[in-house]
Image: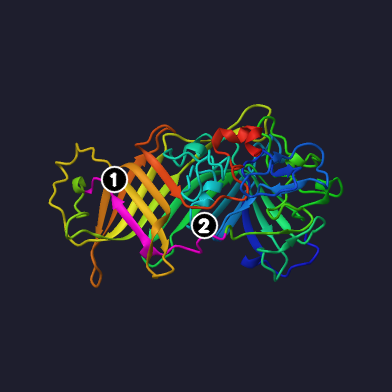
Amino acid sequence: MATQQRNRIIYQSEALFVSPSSTGVHLQISDDNQLDVHGNTTWTGATGAAIVASQNIRSLTMPLERVQSANFNVGINRTDINELGVLARIDSIAMESPTIGLSFNYFLTDGGNERKLGFNVPTSAIASRDSAAYNTGDLAISGKSALSGLLDDNQGNNYFIVVSKEGLDVHNDTVTSATADFDVISIGNGFISDYSVEASVGAIPSASVTVEAFNIKADDRISGGAIYSSGPAPVIPAVDAEDGTFYNGTTSVSKQFFMQGTESITASALNTTGSNGTPSALRPGDITLSIGNAANYQGLTDLVDDGEAHIQSFNISVPMSRTVLQRLGNTFGYARVVDLPLNIDISMSVIVSELKTNNMYDALCQTEKHDFTLTLYGCDASTGGTSSTFKMKYIVKGARLEGEDFSQSIGDSETADITFSCQVGGANDTEHGLFIDGSYNLFRCLPFYPLGSNKDDSSSYDG
């Protein structure tokens, strides 16, 4: 597809981007000459037939940082048509939308990736929403569940895998208005169906994400002169939830995209590494885990006394299975909703030091709950030790013990795998579920990554 034929594609030539919504605008325009990433310039979601060359333009598509792998797959669901008198099928028709899957994992940094993906992640690095410095703020709500926006999301997000020229890094590669040296794999109406976090001894803490989507397509260009009224331009991969139609062939800039760069379509440098304040990675030695109400733990492993267990790994898993809602007249589903109630699974592996005096029969009627706080700090450059300020913080509230699994073999220390679970509450429930805090700097495009149903409000993309 690219004008410069490649012999192969390796990791330097691909990068993963995400948009703030699936069917909302992906571009902004401004008539002001001053360009201020803090939001002091008035930006408007790009609509209409074209953008004039005198207007400033910027993309709402942002890179996901520290991505280690990205995989996608396509499956077409067909129904065979047979009839009496004919052995082989006479046709095989598609009865529903294709099955599109995307999975990726990345190193944890400062919560910026989670915020872009639609999690409610307040940040400690910017002032409040009413601050004069950041007059529109981050739109994340402190104290609310990290999943509150995802549960209220009817659109999902679009995901873009940019494929650059062979031998060149995607980062800082130049995009021009006429280029066809890039390919873009676009995944439309993507909803997160699984999110998990793992921190363990000897490994960089990471997150894994699984996405289910309605559509996928590939374009042979990353931008186009049609944004300035000439030449073809790629359109978003989303499917309209109202009538199931695809936007192929549209000339409206509200359905066009180009990849994140500077505010000029004619010469943009791609950015895949985020802001200067984003840590390259976090160390397992800079992680702390605290367990609330540990003194009343009903298992056999000692978690709090002098012989407390030594934690080797900690995992949070949020499986968000979804059901596609269909209706007559639509080939594609009109919604992909989370199956409720929703459970969060917590597991940790420990080296056992002491056992706790306990009788499991006596504990059968106990309803002890535990809050887990996983705090990830950065590295103090002056001392080489742990920084005093956190980079990310995961809080799981209202978890109950599910079981313990002990293991002992010759040559090894005795270990125990302990599992807990909790159930996600509503957006106004502060006692149950998953809560995330971050420290990411103000995004180039915030506050234009609205959460939940706010994606449906066109004014969410103005500022």
Q: Which element type, helix, strand or loop, lies under badge 2?
A: strand
Query: Residue 279's mark?
Result: none
Q: Quadrant of residue 3?
A: bottom right
How would you rate the neighbour count of disc 2 (Cα within 10 Å): few for under 14, some for 14-19, many for 20 or more?
some
Which residue is identified by label 2?
Answer: 105
Residue nearest the observer in this picture, 31 or 373:
31
Figure quadrant of the C terminus: top right
How would you rate the neighbour count of disc 1 (Cα within 10 Å): few for under 14, some for 14-19, many for 20 or more?
some
Q: Residue at x 39, y 70 (%)?
A: 383
Residue nearest the observer in this picture, 129 or 53:
129
Residue lying farthest to the right in this orientation = 230
Residue 160 pos. (x, y %): 65, 52
Query: Residue 402's mark?
Result: 1
Instruction: Tell me how many marks there are.
Output: 2
Give the magenta-colored segment's residue range: 276-294
Q: Nearer the viewer, mark 2 or mark 1?
A: 2
Q: Quadrant of residue 64?
A: bottom right
Asked if 83 appears above or below 10 in the picture, the reply is above
Q: Amino acid at mark 1?
A: Glu
285 drawn magenta: yes
Colouring scheme, one of rainbow, by chain, secondary structure, one colour: rainbow
Residue 120 pos. (x, y %): 49, 42
> Mark 2 to mark 1: distance in Å?
27 Å
